């Protein structure tokens, strides 16, 4: 029997769930508050003006660094993406003295940008964006999705929420108070992220693409333009640097300018000299990553068949892209 199903959220969890439901023959409609899919699999198109007044754009992967596959199911999914050419293995040159990445773990990134993974999954799936869902109402005809006080389309038989826990909790509160309570309590780590373009002329670029500083505000520093399928521009280095969760939490409400100053200084220390920024900015991820854990399959999603209401996402499936995919 064909069901009309609304999926709220078009990150890896929502996109995976939507694709599986379409393949099972259902009529699926996806809603996301962003202008396109991807969620935390994110690439920023940064517009800036160079010293000659010329407009420039630079694309920087400022969310998830990539994905590692541990389970056989996710390994098979990644392998299919590699065969089809929309995932590529990323073997960064590590900074001297950094420990190797988890032994035996292969790291993959979508190409040409991070949202491509969700774009592929959602090919042919009906979607509305940007559409920030602010209410779900159940009536005898089904579920009515509401955004900005307006009903969105015809009623649905089933609804799946594929959102970070704080956003899921807000929608669940009038519908499933126990789920809403558990989602509101789900611990998520924040992350301040610095991204920008630096001039490389006159300075030898460091001989690494990925560094994990042992101390200081930064946890990860990477050359975004050294990743597979990304554009390299002569004379430019494209940097993305993620602050540690503890540092980000401590300075979560600080002004972005102050945060940018601190993180630029930390990055300069990591590369061992002055960085000549052409343009840079920061992004605050309030809910970047759940606490690391791998959930049992039966606990990795919520489903109430009576209500026709489900919830998936990384906070249920376990840390990271693989956890979100397994949950979906
Ligand atoms: C800085 C950073 C680094 C990371 N590094 C890694 C890494 O190296 N490896 C790894 O595996 N994972 C990493 N992660 C985590 C990984 O990105 C996430 O675990 C995963 O992408 C979560 O997918 P999701 O579908 O559950 O949620 P999301 O990707 O957050 O998707 C949720 C979607 O819901 C939408 N939404 C929210 N509220 C509403 C609403 N009210 N109405 C409509 N739509 C809404 C959002 O716009 C979003 O598109 C990182 C994350 C960050 C931020």
Image (tube, grey):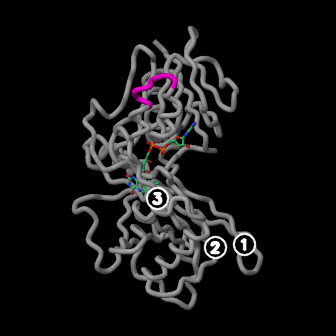
Question: The N terminus is located in which quarter?
Answer: top left
Q: Which residue is mark 1?
A: 49
Residue 156, above or below 69: above
Instruction: Tell me the residue at 40%/62% (across/down).
Output: 246
* Left or right for 137, reference 108: right
Vertical comparison of 104 with 206: above or below: above
- Name the residue beneath numbered marker 2: 279
Q: Exactly how many numbered labels are in the figure?
A: 3
Q: Cα distance, mark 1 to mark 3? A: 27 Å
Percent position of residue 79, x then y: 34, 48
Q: Is residue 177 magenta?
A: yes
Q: Nearer the viewer, residue 219 or 328?
A: 219
Question: Crowding at label 3, few (<14), some or many (≥20) Cα neighbours within 10 Å?
Answer: many
Say if disc 3 is inside 8 Å of ligand 1. Answer: yes
Residues shaded magenta: 174-180
Residue 292 percent across, percent down from the top left: 31, 50
Q: Residue at image x 45%, y 22%?
A: 309
Q: Which residue is mark 3?
A: 191
Q: Residue at x 26, y 69 (%)?
A: 100
Which callout, 1 or 3, points to the residue nearer the camera? 3
Disc 2 crowd, CA 10 A, few/some/many (<14, 14-19, 20+): some
Counting residues from the N terminus, which is met first, the one under dot 1 or under dot 2? 1
Residue 147: x, y in percent?
Answer: 65, 31
Q: Secondary structure at mark 1?
A: strand
Labelled pair 1, 2 in contact (Cβ < 8 Å): yes
- Viewer-proximal residue among 93 and 273: 273
Q: Residue at x 38, y 41 (%)?
A: 186
**Pointer 1 and pointer 3: residues touching (CB < 8 Å)?**
no
């Amino acid at each position: 029997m064909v069901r009309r199903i609304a999926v709220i959220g078009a990150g890896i969890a929502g996109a995976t769930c939507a694709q599986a439901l379409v393949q099972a023959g259902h009529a699926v409609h996806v809603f996301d508050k962003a202008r396109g899919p991807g969620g935390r699999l994110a690439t920023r198109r940064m517009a800036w003006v160079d010293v000659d007044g010329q407009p420039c754009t630079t694309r920087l992967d400022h969310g998830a660094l990539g994905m590692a596959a541990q389970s056989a199911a996710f390994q098979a999914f990644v392998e299919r993406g590699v065969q089809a050419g929309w995932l590529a293995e990323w073997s960064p040159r590590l900074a001297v003295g950094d420990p190797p990445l988890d032994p035996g773990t292969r790291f993959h990134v979508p190409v040409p940008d991070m949202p491509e993974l969700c774009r592929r999954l959602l090919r042919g799936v009906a979607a509305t964006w940007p559409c920030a869902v602010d209410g779900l109402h159940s009536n005898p005809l089904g579920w009515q999705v509401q955004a900005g006080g307006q009903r969105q389309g015809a009623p649905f038989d089933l609804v799946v929420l594929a959102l970070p826990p704080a956003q899921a909790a807000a929608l669940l509160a009038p519908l499933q108070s126990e789920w809403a309570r558990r989602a509101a309590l789900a611990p998520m780590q924040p992350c301040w992220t610095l991204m920008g373009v630096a001039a490389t002329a006159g300075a030898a670029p460091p001989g690494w693409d990925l560094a994990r500083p042992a101390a200081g505000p930064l946890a990860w520093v990477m050359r975004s333009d050294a990743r597979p399928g990304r554009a390299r521009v002569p004379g430019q280095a494209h940097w993305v640097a993620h602050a540690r969760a503890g540092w980000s939490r401590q300075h979560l409400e600080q002004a972005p300018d102050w945060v940018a100053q601190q993180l630029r200084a930390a990055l300069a220390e990591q590369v061992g000299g002055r960085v000549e920024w052409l343009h840079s900015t920061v992004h605050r991820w309030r809910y970047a990553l759940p606490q690391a854990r791998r959930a049992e399959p039966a606990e990795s999603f919520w489903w109430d068949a009576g209500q026709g209401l489900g919830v998936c996402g990384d906070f249920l499936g376990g840390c990271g892209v693989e956890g979100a995919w397994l949950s979906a």
